Image (cartoon, rainbow, N blue to C red):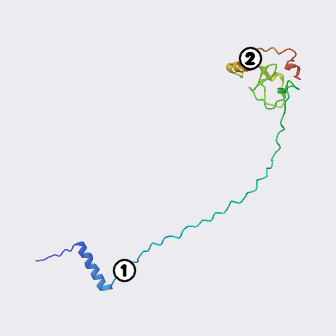
Amino acid sequence: MTSFLVAQPAQSAGLLDDLARALFGQPRPPPQVYFVPPAPLSVTVHPKRRQQPRKLVASKPTAPVVKFDPAVDPYWYLDDPTLRRGDIVVTHADVLVFEGRASQSHRASDFTALNRSRLVSKATQQRVGAATGAHTSVPPAGVQTMAARDPAN
């Protein structure tokens, strides 16, 4: 008759430990772990250096400012370099729409009366006409037409 002795896992671990102690001596105890709190952080703040303001260097000269005086020149808008197609110019005599090209000087033929311009919508024509009282295209007495200044005429 054969008999088998089956040991439980917990008992077999103890058996092997006993055997290891007998053969190799007492094992070393596990090393002790100690918690050492870290040293507090230290931060040094230095004031920011004052930066000298940068000197402005103009790379190219600025364009001269054009000043218009309608009291001196009633056709000031003929020399206006800022006019763009569709701009509305209101003078004491009439309301005009610029239909020419952008340039330094313009001709009287570059302008059209507000009520005849196709660049401005009817709604805008009515609003500008109501605001300026430009529902008539007859200039006031004593006012020359702009064709008198146009060098092409």
Residue at the extreme left of the image, as rendered: 1
Closest to the observer: 141 or 42? 42
Residue 57: x and y, percent?
Answer: 80, 50
Left or right: residue 86 versus residue 105 is left
Could you tell me which residue is drawn at 81 percent across and 14 percent down? Answer: 138
Quarter residue 23 falls in: bottom left
In the rendered image, which quarter is residue 74 located in? top right
* 10 displayed left or right of 125: left
The secondary element bearing badge 1 is classed as loop
Characterize the local packing of mark 2: few (<14), some (14-19) or many (20 or more) Cα atoms within 10 angstroms.
some
The N terminus is located in which quarter? bottom left
Query: What residue is disc 2 on?
Result: 115
In this view, 59 is above or below 152:
below
Please provide percent x and percent y for residue 16: 27, 79
Q: Quadrant of residue 40?
A: bottom right
Which of the numbered marks, if any, corresponds to residue 129? Answer: none
Q: Nearer the viewer, residue 81 or 65?
A: 65
Which residue is identified by label 1? 29
Give amino acid for label 2: Asn
The residue at 79%/32% (across/down) is 82
Query: How far across and how far down the image is residue 51, in percent?
Result: 73, 57
Q: Quadrant of the C terminus?
A: top right
**Residue depicted at x 78% and y 26%:** 100
Q: Nearer the viewer, mark 1 or mark 2?
A: 1
What amino acid does circle 1 point to?
A: Pro
